[in-house]
Image: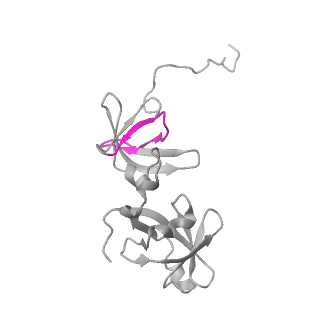
Amino acid sequence: MAKLKDPVLMATIGAAQGLRGDVRVRCFTANPLTVGDYGNLHAEDGRMFEILETRPGKNNMIVIRFRGVNDRTAAEALRGLNLYIERDNLPDDELDDDEYFYADLEGLDVFDDAGNSYGAISAIFDFGAGDLLELKGPGRRPVLIPFNESAVLEIDFTDRRVLIDPVAAGLIDDGDDDTPDFPDPDGR
C-alpha cells in the first residue's frame, strides 16, 4: 500500500473490546459514528482498514469491527495505531463559510495587520473550553491563542495566511490596565 499524499488523522485505536476482534476507537470527526463514511482508513505503515461495523462505546469512544480482525489477540495488536484518510476524501462542499478542517489550518502563516509574523499554525487543540491554535516560529517557543472571531480576524487559504489581533489573542498587552486596585491585606 502506498503512503497517502495528504493524510488527515481520523482516529486512534484504543483497547480491544470483547473476544471477536472489536476495538475501542477515539474518532476526530464531528460525529464519531460516521468515521467510516470517508472511505477506508490507513495506518502510517501502509495497512488499510475497512470498517464493517461501528457502534457507540463509553467515555466518548466508539467500538469498531474491522475486516480481517477476528479475535482479541489481533485487536490488541492494533492498540495505539493512528488511522488516516486522504485529504481529498473530506467533503469540502458540506462546510459552512466559517468552518474549517483542522488539517487545512496547519502550516498557515500568522500575521497581524501591521505585517508582524507570529509563526505558523502547528496544531489545533480543544481542551474543552474552545479551540486553541498553537503557533510556532523560528527561535520561538510555541504559544497558544484562542481560535475565535476576536482573535482570528481572517483566514486566507489562497495566500496561506491568517490575520490575527495580537491583543485579543493575548500575545501583546494593550497597555489599558483595567485591573481594579485592591487594598493590600493590611488594609492600607
Viewer-closest of 187 and 41: 41
Q: Residue at x 49, y 79 (%)?
A: 77
Q: Residue at x 48, y 42 (%)?
A: 147
Viewer-closest of 2 and 59: 2
Does the magenta segment cover residue 136? yes
- The answer to whether residue 140 is left or right of residue 173 is left
Q: Is residue 156 above or below residue 104?
A: above
Q: Is residue 27 above or below residue 43?
A: above
Q: Which quarter shows the N terminus?
A: bottom left
Give the x, y percent position of residue 71: 56, 86
What is the residue that sits farthest to the top in this orientation? 188
What is the residue that sits farthest to the front in this orientation? 93
Which span is picked out in magenta?
135-157
Which image quarter: residue 39? Answer: bottom left
Which image quarter: residue 82? Answer: bottom left
Q: Residue at x 46, y 20 (%)?
A: 175
Give the x, y percent position of residue 94: 46, 55
Q: Is residue 84 above or below residue 112?
A: below
What is the residue that sits farthest to the right in this orientation? 187
Give the x, y percent position of residue 79: 51, 74
Does the magenta segment cover residue 81? no
- The answer to whether residue 165 is left or right of residue 55 is left
Which image quarter: residue 158? Answer: top left
Q: Is residue 114 above or below residue 187?
A: below
Q: Residue at x 50, y 19 (%)?
A: 176
Instruction: Give the image's coloring scheme.
Output: one colour
